[in-house]
Image: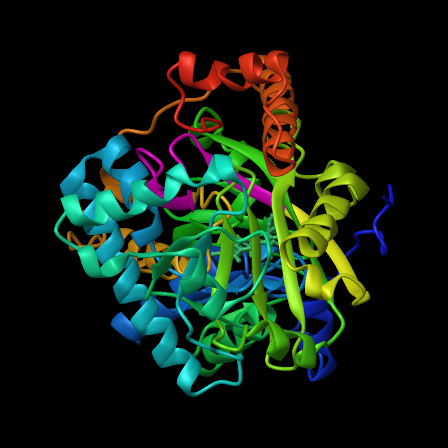
Amino acid sequence: MAHTPSIMPADPSWWFADAMRAEGAAAPPLSGEIMVDVAIVGGGYTGLWTALALKERSPALRVALIEAKLCGSGASGKNGGKVHGYWASLAGMAKNIGDDAALSVARAGTIAQDAIREFAKNHDVWWREGGTLRVSAAPAQDARIAGYIQAARRLGVPDTAMALTAADVAARCRSPVFRGGVFLPEGATVHPARLARALRAAAIKSGVMLYENTAMIGLDKGAPNRVRTQNGQIIARDVVLATNCESAAEPLARAHVSVFSSYAVMSEPAPEKLAAMGWTGEEGISDMRMFVHYFRTTADGRVLMGSGSGPIAYGGGTTATKLREDAASALRAERGLRRLLPALADVPIARAWGGPIDVSADRLPFFKTMPGTRVHFGCGYSGHGVNPSWIGGQCLASLVLNAHDMWTNLPLCTRALPSLPPEPLRYLGGTAVRRAILACEDAEERGQAPPLAASAVAALPKLMGLRIGTR
Ligand SMILES: Cc1cc2nc3c(=O)[nH]c(=O)nc-3n(C[C@H](O)[C@H](O)[C@H](O)COP(=O)(O)OP(=O)(O)OC[C@H]3O[C@@H](n4cnc5c(N)ncnc54)[C@H](O)[C@@H]3O)c2cc1C
């Protein structure tokens, strides 16, 4: 078996390179001082949806958005492009935040799905709606199927999750390792970077002053706030920090968010092989590992295979090379492709890449105003942000507008956030537990019992009362 990936992971992602081929010049960088009502920092989905929500609700508002690089060059332009809300998370959410709160978040996800679909109708973002399929790919994963079905039934929403036999799964996507699964009708796939760039164009069209290659280098909180950049500054009544993993280092977020990484490979086109496997229904698929494999097809017959198993960063930092260039994590994604979809065993890999993900202590994002300020921020998407960042945009817009509405009443804005262990325990413990869980899940995929020592370490998060890292 190969010990290095076919292609070393590197930026840009296949998606971002593809989207930028059709683009003109970057938006100009900020130079000099401007005064606005709202300054948004970060040009990924969260910042862009926030800008669009603000202009839609209050067209006269002066909104400026700065992006350190190019809009969509962060996670928004490199993700798997699997778009779904929270029905697949119902069981875990109900345990963590209660039944009613879980249902309110899942319903918000459906509103987000409708809104993204509406946006996609008018933009070439490869929106394809085939539902979400979660498959068991090892005997040890079988028991998890019942968890989805029971939660949906118990909470009175049985139509959101349907049990599938091995034959049902094979009818959607044939693989010798798929053993059964769950089908969730809510789910689409998208070209993530085209979505980000289309949001950027829509924001500019709506009157947002947008500056690329403009990093915030300092923020003086006050009334008004001052956002400092290399060659200018923005004076703004309200500031929205939509910087994703960078926000994880904010003092208010630090206790609640850790930074891990996720990796993906994109295959060359193989439409005839997909047809032979019967995978033509455009479903976005994941297995039932904790360090999940996520996969989907593209319109030209490629397969993206991702592995949410990348390393953890120390102290929420986002600059570590291993968050973007970890060969072992890219190799896990590639091995996942070959094992889960052996019909694609000899299809070449076109590109591999990785990036940081902001994992919150209960795997849900949060959106807050820093006490005593008009600075709002959000993060904690936990590797699942394409649909939720639309919700984030609504929540942040409502916080800016002082609106007490369904968005600010969501648990994503109101819940008390659980904490993670402090550093260096978080990094050392997170690294050890990650290795142990990978060892257990790899053994289970081989049909073997997990090693005893690894099982013991993998059990620690649960024993410590944590809500992540538990399986
Ligand atoms: C490999 C990978 C696969 C994923 N797959 C999926 C998936 O299939 N489905 C799903 O739902 N989610 C997925 N996710 C998660 C999803 O991509 C993110 O949750 C989502 O894109 C977050 O959007 P964002 O706007 O908050 O962050 P980002 O897109 O990262 O945007 C933040 C922006 O802020 C900018 N910025 C940072 N600091 C500054 C500063 N000081 N000044 C100015 N700008 C700054 C950055 O340059 C960046 O562009 C995946 C993530 C990764 C990394």
Q: Identify the residue at image location x=17%, y=49%.
A: 153
Decide if residue 424 is in sight here: no
Say left or right for 103 vs 33.
left
Give the image quarter of residue 212: bottom right
Report if residue 361 lies within the magenta region.
yes
Say left or right for 286 vs 187.
right
Report if residue 312 lies within the magenta region.
no
**Residue closest to the eye, 191 or 245:** 191
Q: Identify the residue at image location x=28%, y=40%.
A: 91
Q: Does 142 sit above or below residue 132?
A: above
Q: Which residues are magenta?
A: 356-378
What quarter of the picture does the N terminus occupy?
A: top right
| Residue 120, image x, y percentages | 43, 80
Say left or right for 403 vs 307.
left
Q: Residue furthest bottom?
A: 122
| Residue 385, image x, y percentages | 46, 54
**Residue closest to the eye, 245 or 235:** 245
Q: Identify the residue at image location x=31%, y=40%.
A: 147
| Residue 146, image x, y percentages | 31, 42
Q: Does 88 sit above or below residue 345?
A: above
Q: Tag count in the figure? A: 0
Q: Identify the residue at image location x=15%, y=55%.
A: 405
